[in-house]
Amino acid sequence: MPHRSAIFLALFAATALSACQARDGDSPTPPAAKPAPAQPPAARALSSTLGKIQVTELARGLDHPWGLALLPEGGYLVTERSGQLRRIGTDGAISAPLAGVPKVFAEGQGGLLDVALSPDFASSRRIYLSFAEPGDNGTAGTAVASATLGADALADVKVIYRQEPKLDGPNHFGSRLAFDGQGHVFISQGERNHRPTSQELDKLQGKLVRLNLDGSVPQDNPFAGKAGARPEIWSYGHRNMQGLAIDPRSGKLWESEHGPRGGDEINLPRPGLNYGWPIITHGINYSGLPIPEAQGREKAGMEAPYHVWEKSPGLSGMAFYTGHAGSPWTDSLFLGSLAERNLIRLGLKGDEIVSEERLLNEIGERVRDVRVGTDGNVYVLTDENDGKLLRIAPPEAQP
């Protein structure tokens, strides 16, 4: 029989090796698929200014989920920043990663980002993914691919957009997708923390891009055919856009972006206009020092924010809540908050923002994405190691 000290040494060595592997990122592969909850999820009553809301945890154990799409047949598509696209069933079961997803640059704020269903998804099963695409010598840039969604894999994967040039650094990729219903897709992105690029029209960093659904450039884009400018550009002077949505009531595009330290903002971007970053801003560097290029909060020829937060909530994800006449939330705009760890609801009267409240404060997790279902519920992703998919039922209408 082996001596007890030998057994102890063997166990110690195995434990040390396991710990070392975990530190180096080489820990054993987690289960490919995650089971559904053993019991139906229970709703939790939380407070809001309009009455109690019911919050239900539909799934958990996601690896920093980033983008959410609601499938018309039921269930969900969720991106994980580390590069996985997963299905979540109506029973909460999380699938193994779908095959065929493009390789991502997963450092810093990079990774697999937004997911959106094509306007003709019901017949084509086509989806769009935005992601940080690796380049040469450690560079990266925002990219968008279209693909056909299968049961456990993507097919016909085609990259329809690449941010050029690719730059070094791990930050400010954006990126959200929105369809205008007229055959175009809008792509938001960041300036990769290279501030001056936002003002340089021969580069795609810090630009809102508008393309046809196949990736070609619309002939009526504001810079199409103009020397020294990229024809994909719709608007410029943006910092790091992580919210993008079309208002179903008016067809207007709304966009939200991170400021630096202070100055998170909403814009209603119009073609060819300059939204000022880094020349006009309400923020300063995280160090407390001024932005070197900043010249104030306003400047002729540049668009001031439509709405601004002097203290940054860390905006991410955006969705309109409209068309539910019996709900107290009708005519609202929801935005995820990363820094404040909650969900922002803006009350709207037309385009005017008339009220603001914070939801999910009791949960205290970073809200990365928000979507509104046809059922009148709001769906939220929390950006955590143990990321969650939550369903929020609105307050009941007052008699």
Image (cartoon, helix red, strand yellow):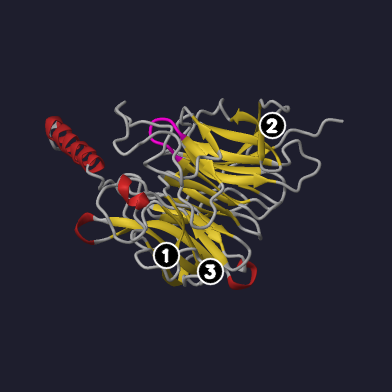
The residue carrying mark 2 is 53
Horizontal relation, residue 180 to residue 85: left or right: right
Within 10 Å of the Cα at label 3, are there few (<14), some (14-19), or many (20+) other Cα atoms? Answer: few
**Residue 264 place in picture, x, y as percent:** 47, 36
The amino acid on which the numbered mark 3 sits, given as a three-letter code, is Asp
- The reply to whether residue 318 is visible in this rendering is yes
Indicate which disc residue 10 carries.
Answer: none
Overall secondary structure of the magenta stretch? loop
Question: Is residue 262 located in the magenta-colored stretch of the structure?
Answer: yes
Horizontal relation, residue 109 to residue 330: left or right: left
* Mark toward the viewer: 2 or 3: 3
Which structural element holds mark 3? loop
Q: Earlier in the sequence, mark 2 or mark 3?
A: 2
Instruction: Give the position of the N terminus as an image quadrant.
Output: top left
Which structural element holds mark 1? loop
Q: Where is 376 relative to 397, above or below?
A: below
The amino acid on which the numbered mark 1 sits, given as a three-letter code, is Ala
Count of numbered labels shown in the rendering: 3
The residue carrying mark 1 is 99
